[in-house]
Image (cartoon, helix red, strand yellow):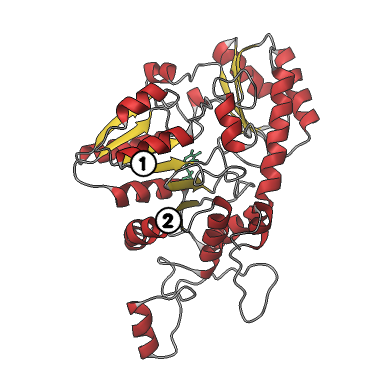
Amino acid sequence: MANWKPKTNAVHGGTRRSQYQEVSEAIFLTQGFVYDSPEQAEERFIETGPDEFIYARYGNPTVRMFEERLALLEGTEDAFATASGMSAVNVTLMAAARPGMRIVAARALFGSCLYILEWLEKFGAEVVYVDGTSEAEWRAGVTPGTDLVFLETISNPTLEVIDLALVTRLARDAGALSVVDNTFSTPVGASAATQGADVVIYSSTKHIDGGGRGLGGIVLGNEDFIRGTFEPYAKHTGAALSPFNAWMHLKGLETLVLRVRAMADSATRIATALDGHAGLARLIYPGLTSHPQHAVATRQMDHGGTMLALDLAGGKDAAFALLNALHVPVISNNLGDAKSIVTHPATTTHQRLPDEQKQALGITPGLVRFSVGLEDADDLIEDLMGALAVI
Ligand SMILES: *Cc1c(COP(=O)(O)O)cnc(C)c1O
């Protein structure tokens, strides 16, 4: 129900029960649906009602439950789930593409998002990159005639926070569609849609799954965009989420609010404990008052986030020594998992970027990304302090 609070919607929103009245949401692991008669099949192909399905590439009851539950949490009219976060970004940009379109994007983007924008440039799109934290650059970039504005609310891995209210207002004034990848912020707290984003994207592989089990993505927006622009392209090009993964992510939503708040509380405690440590050249956490966009972060998220970045004074050697000395977090490249995860972006997720681009984005050899999990914060702090003391 739209008037329920987020924690209630996260548990009950979008539930559809079969004739068996199951408690836990059913997995409709079916590609298609049968019809009572050819007349019914004909009717359904002319117009598919809200609780009718034709083919899993177009929609599936389990996938629909996931879409409706997250739309209620985000506060949008509608949603369409996709096979991964990247398919959500790709289909959104392809479905919105126009000959000679102008896109203004924040420079600090996930590598694969950058790849899609470069792909669009091959077909004549004009892509203008701006410093996401600079109001002046957004103002200069988002001129009338801009078709689309694309950004990630919190950048990876340096955790710059973009002012959603400001950028989405500039986009609206210019007549541009604002598309926001809100994966790092999560749908918990103030939603991106209520802060002005036209289209909101999540990689549900991250916090929504919360256990590193499988890929998923979702695109949320008004009915006009989802059904009029997104769905026609998505259903013909096969971006559909598997019903099994939709079920995992649907169940993930039940505990999302609790998990994200617990992770953010631990992240705050860790950041406070590490603040000023002699082994760190920089400690980046949007929840610390020293973060350049601290005010924006607290307004947008109601917490400081679940991610930290530590820049070790001793460079790559110190970063590797830290990763080798830690016992609790695992070395991997996912985020938002129950298990804390440490990543060395310069040699893994961002390895392919040329050195000068790494430098421009603040991806130094000493930078370590820390996705805070659900372990006891005291164990994480003790582990980090011990590892920093060793190196
Ligand atoms: C992980 C991630 C993606 C891609 O999601 P996949 O599910 O891995 O395809 C896109 N944007 C952001 C910000 C991400 O963290």
Query: Does residue 362 appear left or right of residue 232 in this picture?
Result: right
Using a 10 Å C-alpha cutoff, classify the residue at mark 1 as few (fewer than 14 neighbours), some (14 to 19) or many (20 or more): some
Quadrant of the rendered structure where residue 262 is?
top right
Quadrant of the rendered structure where residue 321 is?
top right
Q: Residue at x 72, y 34 (%)?
A: 265
Label drawn at residue 222 = 2
Tell me the kind of residue under disc 1. Answer: Arg
Locate residue 318, reporting x and y percent: 61, 14
Locate residue 136, reporting x and y percent: 37, 22
Q: Is residue 167 above or below residue 6?
A: above
Query: Does residue 274 appear left or right of residue 147 in this picture?
Result: right
Label drawn at residue 251 = none
Q: Residue at x 61, y 40 (%)?
A: 336
Q: Is the distance from the Cβ of mark 1 to the nearest ligand 1 atom less than 8 Å?
A: no
Q: Earlier in the sequence, mark 2 or mark 1?
A: 1
Identify the image quadrant of the C terminus: top right
Closest to the observer, 172 or 385:
172
* Count of marks placed on residues: 2
Give the farthest residue toward the front.
Answer: 173
Locate residue 56, reporting x and y percent: 44, 68
Answer yes or no: is residue 32 visible: yes
Q: Residue at x 63, y 31 (%)?
A: 304
Query: Does residue 383 appear left or right of residue 300 in this picture?
Result: right
Using a 10 Å C-alpha cutoff, classify the residue at mark 2 as few (fewer than 14 neighbours), some (14 to 19) or many (20 or more): some
Tell me the kind of residue under disc 2. Answer: Asn
Closest to the observer, 385 or 61:
61
Identify the image quadrant of the N terminus: bottom right
Locate residue 39, reporting x and y percent: 36, 90
CA gap between label 2 and label 1 equals 15 Å
Residue with the mark numbered 1: 172
Are the residues tagged 2 and 1 within 8 Å (C-beta)? no
Q: Secondary structure at mark 1?
A: helix
